């Protein structure tokens, strides 16, 4: 690899690789859909996670976000009960892109804002789908960092730094694939280059800009796939 190419690529899991937005709508019963929608509920969860400082249990924040937007605790319980469905729902291009990146020799890692148990389960689901859909039988991420393990949620620096440490690379040797504007800010502050897989068209925030923004993972990583 030349000097411009990173040695490692770290990913946001729940938006960078997965379409996790859909299930937040799906678990809201019909009777409560006049109250709010899944995107509003999830954005409230993100606000709580981004502002909480030291780690608080992911499951507690999901429940608190539901209460804050007027939903019943049944919704939060249903989301957590069906969490494996998130890992089964990558963006369509993801398995092929991950297999191609591994074949090119990049170290691959995940930094995710969920509990350790849910994070590992979800990552294993993604790895299984990559193997199943691409035929790359040995595919696995080289590192996984959860907010619970790091003791903080992104965009605090520690989760990103833990990912770099596990991969054995410096920030200048790594690329981060953001799933949200906060990830762009957080990973940039650590010193990583950042691209943004903005599948759902979130608005930009702050002054941090990605190297590239794409509406799919292959578009965001176009310069690193060839």
Image (tube, rainbow, N blue to C red):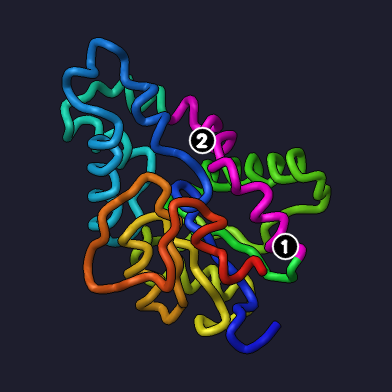
Percent x, y for residue 195?
45, 66
Residue 27 lies left or right of residue 175; in this view the side is left
Residue drawn at the location 44% of the way across and 52% of the way down: 215
Decide which of tag 2 and tag 1 comes sooner along the chain.
2
Separation of marks 2 and 1 at Cα, in angstroms: 23 Å
Toward the bottom, the furthest residue is 3
Q: Which is nearer the eye, 133 or 124?
A: 133
Residue 218: within the magenta? no
The label number, if any, that marks residue 102 in the structure image: 1
For label 1, count other residues whose C-alpha is less than 10 Å away and answer few (under 14), some (14-19) or many (20+). Answer: some
Nearer to us of marks 2 and 1 is 1
Q: Name the residue furthest top.
A: 31
At mark 2, the secondary structure is: helix
The spot of residue 116 in percent (x, y) is 52, 49
Could you tell me which residue is drawn at 29 percent across and 48 percent down?
46
What residue did someone put label 2 on?
A: 86
Quadrant where the N terminus sits is bottom right
Q: Would you place residue 63 above or below residue 140 in this image?
A: above
x, y percent for residue 155: 34, 64
Q: Which residues are magenta?
A: 80-103
How many marks overall? 2
User: Element at badge 1?
Assistant: helix
- Position of 126 with respect to 18 (left or right) is right
Residue drawn at the location 56% of the way across and 56% of the way down: 218
Residue 120 appears anywhere in the view:
yes
Camera sees residue 64 = no
Magenta stretch, main secondary structure class: helix
The quarter in which the C terminus is drawn is bottom right
> How many residues crowd mark 2 within 10 Å: few (<14), some (14–19), many (20+)?
many
Residue 114 picture location, percent across and down = 44, 48
Q: Residue at x 57, y 82 (%)?
A: 173
């Amino acid at each position: 690899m030349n000097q411009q190419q990173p040695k490692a690529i770290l990913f946001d899991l729940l938006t960078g690789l997965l379409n996790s937005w859909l299930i937040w709508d799906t678990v809201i019963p019909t009777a409560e859909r006049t109250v709010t929608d899944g995107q509003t509920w999830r954005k409230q969860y993100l606000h709580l996670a981004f502002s909480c400082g030291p780690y608080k249990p992911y499951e507690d924040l999901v429940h608190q976000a539901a209460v804050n937007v007027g939903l019943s605790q049944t919704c939060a319980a249903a989301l957590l009960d069906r969490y494996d469905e998130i890992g089964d729902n990558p963006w369509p291009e993801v398995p092929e892109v991950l297999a191609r990146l591994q074949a090119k020799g990049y170290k691959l890692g995940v930094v995710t804002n969920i509990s350790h148990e849910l994070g590992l389960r979800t990552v294993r689901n993604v790895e299984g789908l990559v193997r199943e859909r691409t035929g790359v039988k040995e595919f696995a991420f080289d590192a996984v960092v959860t907010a619970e393990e790091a003791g903080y949620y992104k965009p605090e620096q520690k989760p990103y730094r833990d990912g770099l440490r596990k991969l054995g690379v410096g920030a200048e040797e790594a690329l981060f694939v953001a799933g949200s504007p906060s990830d762009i800010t957080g990973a940039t502050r650590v010193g990583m280059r950042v691209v943004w897989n903005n599948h759902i068209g979130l608005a930009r925030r702050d002054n941090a800009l990605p190297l590239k923004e794409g509406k799919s993972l292959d578009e965001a990583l176009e310069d690193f796939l060839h």
